[in-house]
Structure formats: structure tokens, C-alpha cells
Image (cartoon, grey):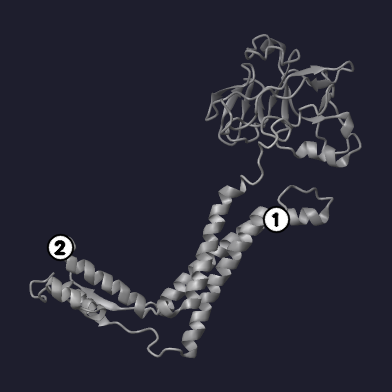
Amino acid sequence: MSAEGPKPPSEAELAEMDRDQLVKLGTALDGVELVDYPTPWPVEGTKAEKRAERVVAAWFAISAIAGLAFVVSLIWWPWQYQAPDNEHAAFLYSLYTPFLGVTLGIAILGLGIGALLYTKKFIPAETAIQQRGDGGSSEVDKATILAQLADSGSRSTIARRSLIKRTAGAGAGVLGLAVAALPVASFIKDPWKDTDNKESLWHTGWLPEKAGEVVYMRRNTGKPEEINLVKAEDLDAGAMETVFPFRESERGNHEALSAAFKRIDNPVMLIRLRPTDAARAVKRSGQEDFNFGDYYAYTKICSHVGCPTSLYEQRTNRILCPCHQSQFDALHYGKPIFGPATRPLAQLPITVDAQGYLIARGDFIEAIGPAFWERKS
């Protein structure tokens, strides 16, 4: 504050001042000279003023409507995969992710444009010159700055802009609801409602649906109706093939045959080790009989964040995940040897039937993929 500035008032004088007086005192005490402080709308109720108010309110309303559309589509839009042969359902499914992005984008954009337009149309654009001062804020400074903020709000006419306040509140509120809906939506379908069936995180599509049911290993030829089962002599030493579960009860059922290829926890890497490598294989405790001769079957879902471990290096017997470069040793029960993964790949117990077809002896004995709250390891 300049040495030549006005003398600060006493506490009694300060208490008796109204807002306009406090504004003038605050600028004077701070060494501020208001060069220009025009009122955006000196004449109330003009057509231009009402038009500007409606434009701002319209953008806030657009934000609110788009935010509500985002919440509704996030929860109720048909999000489950639909095959292309069902054109109407597949078309609605294909719009799910784009619709989420568009509605959330419009909600944020509308709120931002509304705020910018309100600032441009109704906030006073003052021109002031202020000398830099030293030291902290005194009680006088605190009182005067509050008065200046209140005066700015009054000059912006926000108090009498009920339409803008309601639409801005709706836009911000619905956008907040949309943000809250994102984590809540994942809890709407409870995966723990029935943990004994194959739909839970503890089981996969390899789980027999009834006692004595045989689950075969099947190739994906690109044609769901074509059944191509795997025999023990089909793979060369050192080869790897991705296989999927098949049940005789699914034969002729196009929907079930297609679903087997789409289920995320179904893909399994069937690896036939070279004889010299198989002789050096280290088996996991309790899973010593999970392999069939030189054949080992590991889940294709990485134990880090669930990416597909699609790469098999024959020379080193390493299984690689391309997402974050985790590497697993196929000769050492699929344990991680490089990268962020910390748990071995789950191994599927396998054998052959009387016709020589490779089959699963049961489901995985542990949950596959990334960790989750209820998992102990």
C-alpha cells in the first residue's frame, strides 16, 4: 500500500460502511485505479439482454440433457455383444460406445460454452491499474475484497438470472451424476450372486454343466457352425494353438457355438513341448498331472490386467503378453519371469478320450486373469 494512500478506517467506521463504500475503500487502499468499469447491461430488460440470457441458458440445458442421456445409455443401453446376423440388435450394440462418448462430450462442452458465454456477456470487463504491495492481508483488506467480490456478482446480474442459475445447476448436477455413475455402473450386475456357476469370476466356459459331460478342445476356423476338434497328433513338437471349449449338446446350436468363441475367459493356449524341453518341465505343486504327455494348456488371459497372451516363443518356451511385456515360462508352470505380472498363468487340466481327442478334465482350479477383491492370491 502506498504511503500516500487513504487512512484506514476504524473498526466502528468499517462496520457502518455499505458495499459500495467498501468497494471504493478497497480499491483506494490497494492502490488500484479503475480506468473503466462499465455495466454490461446498463438498461435492464432489453431484447439483446434477454436473448443473451436465453443463449447461455440453452447451452446449460443442452449440457444437462446430454449428461442425463449419458447416464441412461450407460445403464440401460443394450451393451452386450450381438452377432452381425441380428442386424437390428448388432446395430444398437455398435452405437453403445460412440453414444457414451458423444453424450459425455456434449455435456462437458455445453457446460464449458455456457460458462464462457456467461463470463463474456454478463461479467463486467473492468480495466484497472494496481501497484504491487508487500505483506499479508489485514482485516480491512479481507472485508474490502469480500465486498468487491459481492459487487462483481451483483454487477454480473447473476442474482436475477434465475433461468441461467437453474440450467447451470442442472448441467453441473447431471454432469456430476454422470461422473458418479461410471464407478457405480460396474456394481449394478453382481458377479457374486451365484458363484457356483460358470458366469462367476471363479469359473470359465470350461466348467462342465452337468456330471460326466465331456468338454472338447476345438479350433476356431472362422465358421461357428464348423466343428473342428483337436487330436493329440495334430500339433507338431514346439507348436502352439488357441483352442476353445465344445460340448456335444452345443452341436447344431448356432448361438451356443458362436458364444463359445466370444466368451473372454474361454481361449486356452494348447502347447506341445519338444521332448527335450518336456523332460525339463517343472510342475506346480498340486498340478503335477494337469498335462497330457508333452501337451500343456494355459489360459490365454494374462494375470496382470487381462490382455491376451498371444505370443509363444518356441526357442525359449516363453509366453509373451504384448500389452505390458510380461513373460511367462511354459516349462515352469507358466510362472512370470519378466514384466509386471506377479502370478503364473492358470493351467487347465487336460487328457484324451478313447478316440484320441484332447479334452478338459475339468475347469481351472483357480480364477484366471487379473486380481480382484475376493481373491486371496
Please name the amino acid that badge 2 sits on.
Asp
In front: 296, or 259? 259
Upstream in sequence: badge 2 or badge 1: 1
Residue 49 marker: none
> For the C terminus, which image quadrant?
top right
What secondary structure is marked by label 2?
loop
156 vs 322, left or right, is: left
Residue drawn at (76%, 28%) of the image: 206
| Crowdedness near tag 2: few (<14), some (14–19) or many (≥20) residues, C-alpha within 10 Å | few
In front: 344, or 371? 371
Q: Could you tell me if residue 5 is visible in this image? A: yes
In front: label 2 or label 1? 1
Residue 134 marker: 2
Please name the amino acid that badge 1 sits on.
Trp
Above or below, comparing residue 118 to residue 244 in the picture: below
Labels 2 & 1 near each other (Cβ < 8 A)? no
Rendering coords of residue 31 (x, y %): 17, 74
Rendering coords of residue 50 (x, y %): 49, 85
Residue that badge 1 annotates: 77
Q: CA distance from mark 2 to mark 1?
A: 59 Å
Q: Which quarter of the figure has residue 92?
A: bottom right
Rendering coords of residue 7 (x, y %): 9, 75
- Outermost residue on the right side: it is 252
Above or below, comparing residue 251 to residue 313 in the picture: below
183 vs 351, left or right, is: left
| Crowdedness near tag 1: few (<14), some (14–19) or many (≥20) residues, C-alpha within 10 Å | some
> For the N terminus, which image quadrant?
bottom left
Above or below, comparing residue 162 to residue 269 in the picture: below
Rendering coords of residue 328 (x, y %): 60, 24
Residue drawn at (89%, 15%) of the image: 354
